[in-house]
Amino acid sequence: MLVSVIIPTYNRAGFIKDAVLSVLAQSLDSLELIVVDDGSTDSTRDVLLGLNDKRLRQVYQENKGVASARNLGLSLCRGRYVALLDSDDYWLEKKLELQLGFMQKGGYAVAQTMEAWVRRGRKVNPGKRHQQYAGWIFDKSLELCLVSPSCAMMHASLIQKGYIFNESLPACEDYELWLRVSQDYPVGLLPRVLTVKRGGRSDQLSRNIIGLDLWRIRALLGILEKRGLGREKSNLVRQTLEKKARVYIAGCQKRGRLEEAERVKRLVEPYLYPPVVKI
């Protein structure tokens, strides 16, 4: 088995078929597709049962979140490479074939493609802050996640080394993973749009998690606790942590959430020694 594809899904009956068919239509023959239904309560399960292909494996679990669903898929994959796809996105033709060739030629352990953004059925241009980069992107990725799961492929050896999603984070789990990966590996970027990212809906995770920077703060704290980060990277992480904590705390104070502001202040202060800026 050459490539394992993992699709986590939750209540995506209107989108999951497009995602699955875009994988099964790939020009690469040596693949398996693992769809992890994270406890859907709509007709997602019925849609999946109507899709018959020997390469497709369907797994169901009680709702535990996207990180858990992805990790379950990672634990079951048999391919030498692993590609991720969110259930409301889809791939263009030859995505896997072209990306695999790009990775093997460049010797990359992890790489992503470029993507097109569609919001409410209309194509939009990503903002400058979402620009994708190639190479050692750790410092550029501290502000926000610059690796899209639906664009990413990695060698299966990374899973064995512990590069999986942090299930304690209900959001920003991809931000945390790609920070750890990009600390240790250069990230390849195939300069071709091969992924379509659909969004702009009220049911998306990013729209339903209040205070996303809180989970980025949690992710940064975990990064600082990792051994071997080095002085330069540690300082960059602390600067980003201080900035995000200051903004989050100010937002809490503005909304009268004084206990939460104080809790986060106490949480981050030990990691800011010597503090960059007083919170």
Image (cartoon, grey):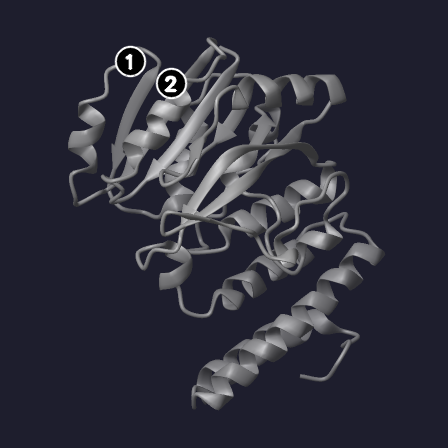
Task: Give the image location of residue 13, x and y in percent.
Answer: 23, 39
Task: Give the image location of residue 51, x and y in percent.
Answer: 23, 21
Q: Which image quadrant is residue 224 in?
A: bottom right
Q: Which image quadrant is residue 61 in?
A: top left
Q: Quadrant of the C terminus?
A: bottom right
Checking the image for residue 24, the label placed there is 2
In the image, farthest residue toward the front: 122
Up-down relation of residue 33 to residue 74 (above or below): above
Could you say whether the residue bearing mark 2 is in a helix, strand or loop? helix
Residue holding disc 1 = 53
Q: Residue shown at 58%/80% (left/top)?
A: 265
Task: Give the image location of residue 35, x and y in percent.
Answer: 33, 29
Q: Residue shown at 18%/23% (left/top)?
A: 50
Q: Which amino acid, mark 2?
A: Leu
Q: Which amino acid, mark 1?
A: Asp
Up-down relation of residue 224 to residue 259 (above or below): above
In this image, 122 relative to 127: left or right? left
What separation in Å lies between label 1 and label 2 (alpha carbons)? 8 Å
Query: Decide: marks 1, 2 in contact (CB < 8 A)?
Result: yes
